[in-house]
Image (tube, grey):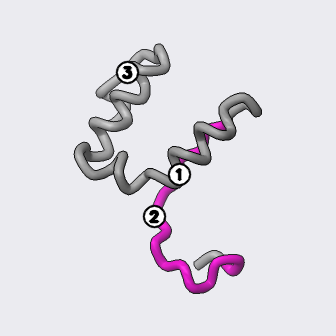
C-alpha cells in the first residue's frame, strides 16, 4: 500500500510510466477524467497496440507475450 494513499486499494502489481510535454497537459488531464469511457470497449493489449500505432511507434507483439 502506498502511504500517501492509504485508503486507495486499486494499485496494480506493475506500473507503466510515460512523460508528456507542457503542451499535452490539458489533453492528459481530460483523458484521466474520462478514462472510464476509454477503457470500456477494449482490453489492455488492444489499447496499448492502438496507442503505439497512433503515436507512430512500432508495435512488437512478441514483447508482450
Q: Earlier in the sequence, mark 1 or mark 2?
A: 2
Q: Could you tell me residue 22's position as x and y percent?
A: 76, 33
Of 52 and 62, which appears nearest the observer? 52
Q: Classify residue 3 as left or right of residue 60.
A: right
Q: Main secondary structure of the magenta part?
A: loop
Q: Earlier in the sequence, mark 3 or mark 2?
A: 2
Q: Residues within 10 Å of mark 1 (few under 14, many from 20)?
A: few
Q: Could you tell me residue 53's position as x and y percent?
A: 39, 19
Q: Over which residues does the magenta segment extend?
A: 3-19
Of 37 and 39, which appears nearest the observer? 37
Q: Classify residue 55 as left or right of residue 27.
A: left
* Marks 3/1: CA–CA distance: 24 Å
Q: Quadrant of the C terminus?
A: top left
| Picture disc at residue 59 | 3
Q: Classify residue 2 as left or right of residue 55.
A: right
Of 64 and 20, which appears nearest the observer? 20
Q: Residues within 10 Å of mark 3 (few under 14, many from 20)?
A: some
The residue where tag 2 is placed is 12
Asked whether residue 51 appears in the rendered view, the answer is yes
Q: Earlier in the sequence, mark 3 or mark 1?
A: 1
Q: Could you tell me residue 18's position as x and y percent?
A: 61, 38
**Residue positioned 33% across, 50% down in the render:** 39
**Residue positioned 72% across, 29% down in the render:** 23
The residue where tag 1 is placed is 32
Query: Is label 3 in a helix, a strand or a loop?
Result: loop
Determine contact: label 1, label 2, CB under 8 Å. no
State the image quarter where residue 12 is shown.
Answer: bottom left
Say if the magenta span includes residue 13: yes
Amino acid at each position: 500500500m502506498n502511504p500517501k494513499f492509504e485508503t486507495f486499494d486499486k494499485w496494480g502489481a506493475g506500473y507503466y510510466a510515460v512523460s508528456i510535454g507542457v503542451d499535452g497537459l490539458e489533453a492528459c488531464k481530460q483523458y484521466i477524467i474520462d478514462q472510464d469511457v476509454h477503457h470500456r470497449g477494449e482490453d489492455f493489449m488492444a489499447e496499448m497496440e492502438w496507442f503505439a500505432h497512433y503515436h507512430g511507434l512500432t508495435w512488437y507483439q512478441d514483447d508482450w507475450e
